[in-house]
Image (cartoon, helix red, strand yellow):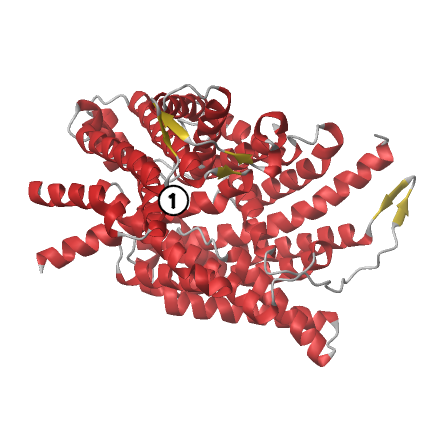
Amino acid sequence: MGGALVLLGALLAAWPWLAPRYFVFLASLVLINAVVAIGLNQLSFGHAGFLAIGAYTAALLTIHAPALPVIVTLVLAGSLTAVVGLAFGVPCLRLSGLYLAMATLAFGFVIAETLLSLEPLTHGADGLRVPAARLGGVTLATDTGRYYLVAVVAALLTAAAVNLARTRTGRALLAIRESEIAAQASGVSVARYKTIAFGLSAFYTGVAGGLFAFVVGFLSPDAFDVFLSVDFVVMIIVGGLGSVPGSVAGAAVVTVLHDGLASFQSYRPLIFGVLLVVCMLFMPGGLTSAVRALARR
Amino acid sequence: MSAAALLHVVVSGLATGSIYALMALSLVIVYNATRTLNFAQGEMLMVSTFAAWSAQRAFALPLLLACAVAVVTGALLALVLERLVIRRAIGATHWDVLIITLGLSLALQAGAGLVWTHDQFPFPSFFDNRPIALGPARLAPASLGIIGASLVIMAALAALFRWTRLGRAMRAVAQNQRAARLMGISVERVYAAAWVLAAIVGAIAGVLVAPVIFLSSKMGLIVVNAFTAAVLGGFGSMPGAVLGGMLLGVIENLAPFYLPSGIRYSVPFLVLIAILVVRPAGLLGRLEQRKV
């Protein structure tokens, strides 16, 4: 396990020297999506909205306060998203299943609409150009520079997520996921930990949104539509619900697949859709269970 | 706004709402039988409506026959999808089935785009477009027709669920699948019947709505509104789906007259969140008592 981690770290660090420039950009996208997928701990169809809040916050901070180091910008983007996430999440604590999914979907629509109408700030449908991120005296203006920023932040957040599972909070969240009633009966404050989960999820997605803004360099509200939210859900289910490696694998598969199919143009959704169906028919439980089943054999 | 204008807006809202209600009923029928949310319901509506349009143009069919083509296509498509795909995933978790129907919806939409292109096409209407005067108010025959046809279908569905053997079997499976199986009901047949029934309702909704919103490969997106309507009313409840659909249609049509343009499209969703905060299981829904 330790050896595999070192190998993975080395591969991440060496990637810009191994791969062509475009694949460095693609790897950044994979890592950003992985951060969202790790943070996506429940079925939500509104995470594109959270991503948008993080992205626009980071972009506007960089435009209006260029002296701010990028780390501070990202933390602020994550925090603001967490605040919005809590403001939305706390009233929705009583919802579950389909109702929660629908509320998150509604939330995503409202955010997209709000971004369009806040024209003085976001330039509406015209979009917003994001200046390069700055860290001290260094400007991260190349794909490689941006990649390293993403890789470091993604590694930190992934490590935090893995470690969270071993804390009291992590165990409480796991208990709630397995059975809310059993968790409550065992003295876990469901409302409190669900609030924490909501905040954390929004924070992760907000930071990912900030990274997204820098990597893509241009924001417009239609980039954050419901299809993106659906993609995130696909990532965690294809990867296998509730596992950090599964989330990362799901993010990688979906991102690379979308990119690889881009040249098929109008056949792309057809191929993607059929792949999803076949994948779930022959690999129920996603990649994580498939790997486990192979290991058992 | 004058009373006459208000009446006009409310009636066209009810017409939009009837379509949402029909689609919401489709979703609820499948959900009650199989506990699956069928994301592809909208695309199935779209494909059956396109089939009706093609048949109507190729053979110069009267509209009623074209509607029958839509119904048959929808039913066949549902049967094939249920048999080939959904049935194989019976043991899978809800999430897996959710992704499967999502995949089906992507594939159907892209497939329809390849066959019929992604353009918009006008679709012939059953109804005259000269407005009917009702006192000072002027009402569109299309709106009244859609409302009337939808009410007929809803009544037929209610009768089917109340008085037929199939309806009773479907209600039994919705209540308790294991008990239903022990009573000799073929749960698999109920699954298939639910898919077919939902597709038939969807196909009729498609033929009704296509003249209003045009025929296009994107018309399946109406499923999002239907989902909103079903949740608003309380998912799983059929009267709830109708109530939610009507409410959503009226709110959508009224909002632009009273609210600034920046938030008008958000209104249905804000209403939805507000209602869910007060009633977490929708207007007519009941929270399921879950055990450990």
Residue farthest toward the front in the current orientation of the protein: A137
Instruction: Determine the secondary structure under disc 1.
Output: helix
Q: Quadrant of the N terminus of chain A?
A: top left
- To which residue does mark 1 refer? A232
Disc 1: host chain: A
Residue drawn where x is 26% and y is 31% of the image: A157
Q: Amino acid at mark 1?
A: Phe
Would you say A51 lies left or right of B142 here? left
Drawn side of residue A183 relative to residue A49, left or right: left
Residue A260: x and y in percent read 38, 59
Q: Is residue A262 left or right of residue A118?
A: left
Classify 10 Å Cα crowding around label 1: few (below 14), some (14-19), many (20 and above).
Answer: many
User: What x and y, as percent, mark residue B159?
Assistant: 58, 56
Q: Quadrant of residue A123?
A: top right
**Residue sitting at x 57%, y 51%:** B221
Q: In the picture, residue A120 is in which quadrant?
A: top right
Frontmost residue, B275 versus B192: B275
